[in-house]
Each structure stands twice: as structure tokens, then as C-alpha cells.
Image: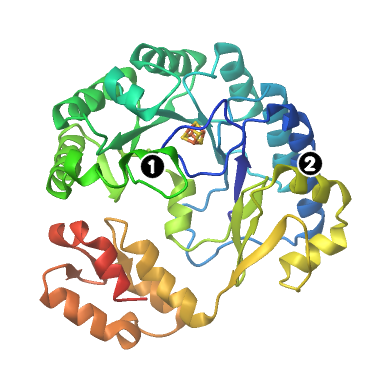
Amino acid sequence: MARHIYIHNPFCVRKCPYCDFYSVTKTSLCEDLYKAAVREAEIIGSVITDNTGTNPVNDKDGKDTVYFGGGTPSLPDSRLVCGLLDSVRKAFNIASDAEITIEVNPSSVTSEKLSDYLQAGFNRVSVGVQSLDDGVLKTLGRLHDSRGAVDAIEKITRAGFENISSDLITGVPGETLEGIKRDIDTFKQLGVKHISTYSLSIEEGTAFFDRYSKTIEDLVSPDEERAMYHGTREHLQDSGFETYEISNSALPGYRSIHNSSYWNSCEYFAIGAGAHGFLGDMRYGHRDDVSAYIEEMNTITPDAYKAFLEGNESVLKSLYAEEILSREDKMREVPFLRLRTTEGILLDDFYKMFGVEFDSVFGNAVKTNIEKGLLERKERTLRLTRSGLDLANVVIEDFL
Ligand code: SF4
């Protein structure tokens, strides 16, 4: 039975102006954080049973996954990253055919680091390109230019990685659909197998919020943004990439197993400051505080960690329960997560998980959205129509 583990590296060279992920620039704490993360992995490994964090009902691929996200996991010394992966593999008894991903940035990834990653067991690289247009990269405040991004992908393939994903941001002021299409073509030529496309969102607390929150709709109208989304999706499809989730497209055989586990409501462990996980009935996290994380992982006892994972109340510095889900909450999460996928809601899986028919719980929301042409039923699945895709959030709201 598969296990899924998310590891958060919170360090970045500097803060990108649009980013609202947890990241810090105090890299002097890298070594201590990675040591603390090794200890966390070892503690979890010592307290879990064979069935903790496994997902017999909804684990479609049946493969273990480990995902190093960030932040910028390619920033620290590869010795730290590979050492942590080694500890995680041992602590969780990770299978040899696991999907093991690392996110890298063009500005910090090197051939030497890539060779270390490969040797340590990473077999999938997700590269944060965002755009191959120098004007767009400048607007986004990225540290690399298009040449640097292409170089990085070439280094990744030369190092021997075959499973490569790349990110693209759409809806950036000054960006064009033609430019996005060119980027997709270049990715394909370079051997990229998976593309994640995100619409730029302007989040409070970011530098972009101050710069664009009042003007973004004048610079990129909602109609233009939607046209860019559909144009991008059509071009991905014409290029052989299947869109399997609102933001994710892959060549056949290259879907992200780790990301799919989220949409299948699978449990996953979290390691690292700012990392979030889901076990049993609990969605939990580590506070966005590197120092608190280091301190806690150096002092917490296995018994205290076990008590936390079992949902017992306790006041901890870094770990906290975000939400304890009731059976009804878990049911509501299914449309929330699955309507983002092109496969949609699998009604037989819902019945296996909860012992009731989806329609007996959400009949009204299903009926209304089918009548509006936003949802369609195909045998034992329910999914968004093309118009529904544009209004995904509105449709999902009806199920919450
Ligand atoms: S590199 Fe990524 S995680 Fe770091 S600040 Fe930029 S967008 Fe955020």
C-alpha cells in the first residue's frame, strides 16, 4: 500500500514579487533545518505502523511518492537534500519504484547537483521556468532569463532525467497566447513531459498586490485571461499533452502520481517548516517558522509526535492541527478536489469510500449544475463541461 510524503524546503535566494508560498532568504539556517528534517523523518518512521498513511481505497497508482517542494529545493547543498531523501527512504521504507520529485530553479540548479539527485534516487524534476519570454520573466522578477531556463532543462536531460515537468504562468501583463504556444513547443522539443500552467493570481501581502491589485483587470481582462487559458489548453492538446487537471497536462504515461494522490483524497505526511499533510481525519501543518521548526524537531519525543499524529490535543511550537474532518467534510472534499480533474468524480469510488451514493448526498447541486450546462454525467462519472471549467469555483461552491 502506497505512502505519500511532502517535504518543504523553505529557502529561496529572494522573494519573487508575486509569490505567497512560505519562503525565507536566511540560508544560514539550511544545515540546521535539514538536520531537523532528518530527525523528523526518523521519528515519524519509528512511530507509524504499516498501515499509517496508506490509502487502499483511493490510491489509483499504488506507488509511493516523495515530493521535495518549496521554496527552492535546488538552493541548498545537494548533500543536505540527498541526505534527507536517504533518511526518508529508510524511515518510510519507500519502494524502489517510487516517484521521487524535486523542484528546481534554473538559477540554482547545476550539473553536479543534478548528478547527486539522480544518484540519491530522485527520478522526476519539476523546473520552475514560468515563461521563456524575457519581458515576462522580468515582470515576474525571476532570477533567470529564457536562455538560463533552456540551459537548465538541457542540463536536466543531460544528467539523465527523463521525467521532467515545467511550470508556465499565464495572465501576466504583457504576455501573449502566441508566446505561450511558442514556450510549449520549446518545452516539447527539449524533452519536457509534463506542463503545469497557473494563472497569475494577485495575493494580498505580495509586492504584486501593491503594484497590480487595482489595475490587473485593465492590463489583462477576464475575457483575455480565459481566452489565454483555453488557447493554452488547446495548444497543449494539439501537442500531445493531455490535460488531466485544471492546471496540469502530461504526455501519456507522465502524469504526476504525487499530485494525483491529493486529488484522490489520499493521506500524506508532511516534513519541514511550512509543510502541510493529511492523516486520518486531520489536516495538519508546520507553522511558517523555520526557527520554531528546528527547535521543535530537536526536542520533541517520539511519544509526543505519535500523540500529535493520533489527533491528541497538545500545544506544540511548529506542528498544529489545521482541521479535523468529519465524515461530511470528507464527502465535501471529493467534489472540491475531483472536479478539478478532467476525469471528474468517480461515483463508484465515492460509494466505496462512504457507503452511500453521491447523488443521495449532493443530488440538488448535481441537478442544478447539469441543468445549467456546467456539469455532465457520463456513465458513473460526473465532470465539468467546457463552460463549467470557466466557472469551476462557482460550481464547487454549490457542493460545499
Ligand atoms: S522561487 Fe518560487 S517559492 Fe521562491 S519566492 Fe520565487 S516563486 Fe516563491
SS of the residue at dot 1? helix
**Residue 36 image position (x, y, % from top left):** 79, 41
Q: Residue furthest bottom?
A: 360
Q: Which residue is mark 1?
A: 210
Label of residue 36 in the image? 2
**Proximity of marks 1 and 2: CB atoms separated by less than 8 Å:** no
| Residue found at x 79% / y 64% | 306
349 or 214: which is nearer to us? 214
92 or 225: which is nearer to us? 225
Label 1: few (<14), some (14–19) or many (≥20) C-alpha neighbours in 10 Å:
some
On the question of residue 51 being in view, the answer is no
| Residue found at x 79% / y 34% | 32
Label of residue 315 in the image? none
Q: Residue 239 appears in which quarter of the rendering?
A: top left
Q: Amino acid at mark 1?
A: Asp
SS of the residue at dot 2? helix
The CA span between labels 1 and 2 is 36 Å
**Residue 123 image position (x, y, % from top left):** 53, 30
Which numbered disc, 1 or 2, marks the residue closer to the eye? 1
| Residue found at x 51% / y 15% | 159
On the question of residue 79 being in view, the answer is yes
Of the numbered discs 1 and 2, the one sitting upstream in the chain is 2
| Residue found at x 32% / y 58% | 340
Q: Amino acid at mark 2?
A: Ala
Specify whether 234 is left or right of 172: left
